[in-house]
Image (cartoon, grey):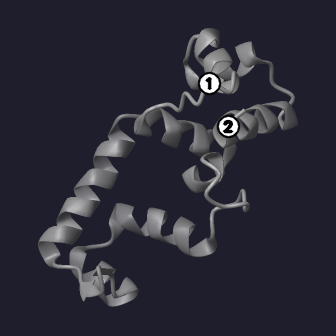
């Protein structure tokens, strides 16, 4: 069984939810949850993966087995919250964002913000 399937099942069981109950919470057919938990290495697409992570208040990295920590770090939470309201200048000032060791350009940051907003709009 893959990391995602094990972790999804554990999170669901920790919340005392059946597969049917989780499916209803996420607006999915129960068969999707069954497939995700089957260990077939089936991982949902980004939109759904983010919805599952948000529902359980864990990071996508945790769901995928990239980290052992379930919780979002304070800086991850802060960045997600800040990206709703901060301007490009605010982001540069507060986070000093870099890409491949070079400061992120305003265009790159605008693209990142647009991407985050589009993901949220899909929910």
Q: Left of 65 or right of it: where is 91?
A: left
Residue 82 locus on image (x, y percent): 42, 69
Q: Marks 2/1: CA distance?
A: 7 Å
Q: Left of 61 or right of it: where is 110?
A: left
Decide: is 34 above or below 73.
Answer: above
| Residue in the picture at 49% in, 31% down | 44
Q: Secondary structure at mark 1?
A: loop
| Residue in the picture at 67% in, 16% down | 34
Residue found farthest to the left: 107
Q: Left of 31 or right of it: where is 115?
A: left
Q: Secondary structure at mark 2?
A: loop
| Residue in the picture at 43% in, 33% down | 45
Quadrant in which the N terminus is drawn: top right
Quadrant in which the C terminus is drawn: top left
- Tell which circle, 2 or 1, labels the residue nearer the N-terminal end: 2
Residue 104 locus on image (x, y percent): 23, 79
Residue 63 locus on image (x, y percent): 63, 46
Where does label 1 land, which residue? Answer: 40
Residue 108, by quadrant, is bottom left
Q: Residues within 10 Å of mark 2 (few under 14, many from 20)?
A: some
CB under 8 Å between callouts 2 and 1? yes
| Residue in the picture at 24% in, 86% down | 103
Q: Residue 102, can we see it?
A: yes
Residue 120, by quadrant, is top left
Residue 30, by quadrant, is top right
Decide: is 105 above or below 58.
Answer: below
Q: Nearer the viewer, residue 66 or 13?
A: 66
Where does label 2 land, which residue? Answer: 2
Q: Left of 60 or right of it: where is 67?
A: right
Residue 83 locus on image (x, y percent): 37, 65
């Amino acid at each position: 069984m893959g990391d995602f399937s094990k972790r999804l099942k554990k999170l669901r069981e920790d919340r005392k939810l059946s597969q049917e109950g989780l499916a209803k919470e996420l607006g999915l057919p129960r068969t999707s949850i069954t497939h995700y938990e089957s260990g077939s290495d089936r991982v949902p697409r980004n939109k759904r993966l983010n919805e599952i992570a948000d529902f359980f208040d864990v990071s996508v990295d945790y769901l995928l087995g990239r980290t052992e920590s379930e919780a979002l770090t304070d800086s991850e939470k802060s960045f997600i919250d800040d990206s709703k309201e901060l301007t490009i200048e605010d982001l540069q000032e507060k986070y000093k964002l870099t890409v491949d060791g070079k400061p992120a350009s305003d265009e790159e940051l605008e693209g990142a913000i647009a991407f985050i907003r589009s993901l949220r709009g899909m929910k």
